[in-house]
Image (cartoon, grey):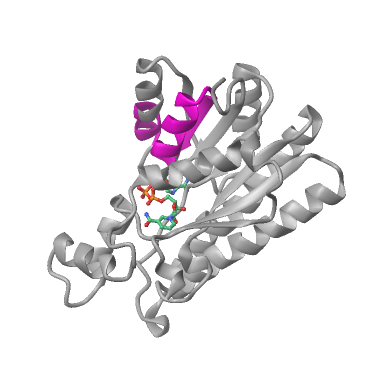
Amino acid sequence: MARVENKTAIVTGGGSGLGAASSELLAREGAAIVVTDVNAEAAEQTANVIRQRGGKAISLEHNVTEQGRWQEVVAATTSEFGDLDILVNNAGISGTGGGPMEDVAFEDWKRVMDINLDAVFIGCQEAIKAMKVSGGGSIINISSIMGIVGGAGAAYNASKGGVRLLTKSVAAYCGANGYNIRCNSIHPGYIWTPMVRNIVQFVEDLATEDDLRRMLIEKHPIGRLGIPEDIANGVLFLSSEESSFMTGSELVIDGGYTAV
Ligand SMILES: NC(=O)c1ccc[n+]([C@@H]2O[C@H](COP(=O)([O-])OP(=O)(O)OC[C@H]3O[C@@H](n4cnc5c(N)ncnc54)[C@H](O)[C@@H]3O)[C@@H](O)[C@H]2O)c1
């Protein structure tokens, strides 16, 4: 029996990086996937890969900051595949890659909060409404090591720290109400995705992506950066019954970044 057989998952930001890898792995382990992304073409590409490998997937254009669209996405999911069992709140941005605290524009701060934190709140709310009537589910919020320690930039850190504690509140609320909905966060170290490669333009003294890569590897005791599949494995675990005693937890997958 596959590890998430007969389950249905929504993965936001599923058109790239961690979201694409998580969608593909959940599908390989038996789940039907609704791949959503603000970039509709990218979402469809992931869904297409899944279908070509014999899995079940559809794609939907979805800006996670729009509450009305969330309701449509959940409705489309249940009408296509039945009950919603898994939500992976993965979509996120790095903003200006941090930048000096004194220089961050307030508009940039608000945009990062909107996508990285407010949208996760909306997603949790809509998932709870759907999952509580179908008997339960698992919500996985992609936070960051930057939600545990400071460093990358004020807005990004604050948004990911917010996701960490929002997750615990959702877990406590759902538990207290007997909803059988688990909610956990994942805290990736640096994973070599378009989001991270993009940082090079914001860091002084870094000429190339190779310079960035070398600088980042040094911060991970394990001696390498992560790959999207490292995080997808965590998503799969938290989606499956293997993690049935976990809720409100922080799953740190960071090659030792926060250990030193
Ligand atoms: N890559 C890392 O090192 C790393 C580390 C820690 C946490 N994270 C988190 O993991 C998540 C995925 O990051 P990634 O590295 O795969 O990034 P990525 O840039 O490769 O992919 C992010 C996806 O989110 C989508 N997206 C952006 N804004 C959106 C919006 N408003 N609505 C819907 N979709 C939107 C993008 O179109 C893109 O497909 C993010 O939340 C990020 O903060 C990444």
Question: Residue 163: x percent and y percent?
Answer: 59, 60
Asked if residue 29 lies in the magenta stretch, the reply is yes
Question: Residue 107: x percent and y percent?
Answer: 46, 68
Image quadrant for the C terminus?
A: bottom left
Question: Residue 40: x percent and y percent?
Answer: 40, 33
* Residue 75 in the figure: left or right of residue 172: left
Q: Residue at x 41, y 65 (%)?
A: 256
Residue 14, quarter of the rendered image: top left
Asked if residue 174 lies in the magenta stretch, the reply is no
Towards the viewer: 66 or 253 = 253
Q: Residue at x 29, y 53 (%)?
A: 192
Is 221 rendered above or below residue 49?
below
Towards the viewer: 248 or 133 = 248
Whether residue 189 is visible, yes or no, is yes
Is 163 rendered above or below residue 64?
below
Q: Residue at x 52, y 38 (%)?
A: 236
Residue 167, quarter of the rendered image: bottom right
Residue lying at the far bottom in this picture: please name it: 102
* Residue 176 in the figure: left or right of residue 229: right
Question: Residue 92: x percent and y percent?
Answer: 46, 53
* Residue 70 in the figure: left or right of residue 148: right
Towards the viewer: 117 or 218 = 218
Range of magenta residues: 19-45
Q: Residue at x 21, y 77 (%)?
A: 204
Image quadrant for the N terminus?
A: top right
Is 255 rendered above or below residue 242?
below
Whether residue 109 is visible, yes or no, is no
* Residue 189 in the figure: left or right of residue 197: right
Residue lying at the far right in this picture: please name it: 177
